[in-house]
Image (tube, rainbow, N blue to C red):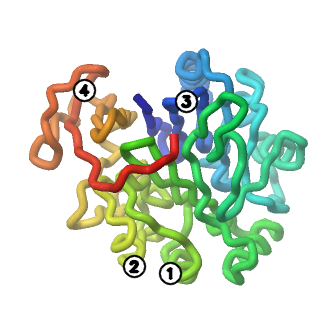
Amino acid sequence: MALVKSLSVGNGDMFYIRHNSSNFTIIDCCMGDDLKEAIVEEVKAESAGKEITRFISTHPDEDHILGLAYLDEQITIRNFYCVANQATKDDPSLSFEHYCQLRDSDIAYNVYKGSKRKWMNQSGDGRDSSGINIHWPDVNHESYQAALEDAAAGLAFNNMSLVARYSVAGGATFMWIGDLHTKFMEEIFDSIDLPKTTVVFAPHHGRKSGKIPNSWLEKLDPQIIVIGEAPARHLNYYSGYKIITQNKAGDIILDAVGEKVHIYVSEDGYGTRFDDFDNENMSEYDNYVGSITVETEYTLDG
């Protein structure tokens, strides 16, 4: 089985994927001093036995890189994926300085729309693909180039975010959109591939400023939208779609087994959601919420 976990880290994002293959992927990092030791121990335990661990940075805002230096110190990041950029900050934090160190090092791989790489999305040398594809950026797009200029000037970083999609062979798909803003997503609509996707993690932690446009939603046709942690007054709740709100759910485990995704949360009070999800009577982890049957065609990724 493949497992995707969205960690409850407060006002920020951090995920990991325990692949069916020999891969383990961390997406973004937000670990305050009160969380970092426990999270790193969990990452170590979950990645034990995996031959390849990669870190994907959607963009270098502090709530997506906090604790990056500590994470690297503890697990030794050997594969750092980010977009090519020259982002600067007037008063750089330790996390941003470490991001730049990794970004400019020989372990960095600059991703872009359609990137091909062992073992991100290509098998080889006896190892399977991880099933991760990059859908954005189109490095030649005018709006993206403007976002890079803003980042280089230290003005804004959200719209330099990459878009990544993970496909489980014969099962679910998951998409991360970083912190892209609604207007930016509308501007790039004609230049990005948006296949039907089972679970979409709402950009900008689910804030209204990052509301996924209807044009995107019609193509993605998600079965679940995960809304991150932010003040409730700033959130968009995607009426008409099944949602999981991390503010109330805490950690979210999405256990992809065959054509099913079984959902668990860390907060006891979140309760079951069998009005929205199926009851498969699962007990692999605590606080089972429900399950869905994947409504997408099988993929060939791993």
Q: Earlier in the sequence, mark 3 or mark 4?
A: 3
Q: Residue 176: image x %, image y %?
A: 51, 54
| Mark toward the start of the polypeptide (3 vs 1) | 3
Q: Residue at x 68, y 72 (%)?
A: 138
Distance between mark 1 and mark 2 Cα atoms: 8 Å
Q: Nearer the viewer, mark 3 or mark 4?
A: 3
Judge whether 288 appears above or below 197 on screen.
above
For marks 2 and 3, give the CA distance: 34 Å
**Which residue is at 23% across, 66% downward?**
239
Callout 1 crowding tier (Cα within 10 Å): few <14, some 14–19, many ≥20: some
- Front residue of 91/292: it is 292
Which residue corresponds to mark 2?
215
Instruction: Spot the residue most to the left.
Output: 275
Query: Mark 4 = which residue?
Result: 287
Q: Residue drawn at (39%, 79%), measured in percent from left and top?
A: 215
The location of residue 168, given as percent across then percent down, is: 44, 42
Tell me how far mark 3 sits from mark 1, CA to CA: 35 Å
Total labels drawn: 4
Q: Which mark is residue 186?
A: 1
Q: Residues within 10 Å of mark 4 (few under 14, many from 20)?
A: many
Which circle, 2 or 4, is nearer the viewer?
2
Counting residues from the N terminus, which is met first, the one under dot 1 or under dot 2? 1
Q: CA distance from mark 4 to mark 1?
A: 37 Å
Q: Which numbered disc flags the more N-terminal residue, 2 or 4? A: 2
User: Could you tell me how far apart the alpha carbons at marks 2 and 4 are, in whole angstroms?
Assistant: 34 Å
**Residue 18 appearing in the image:** no
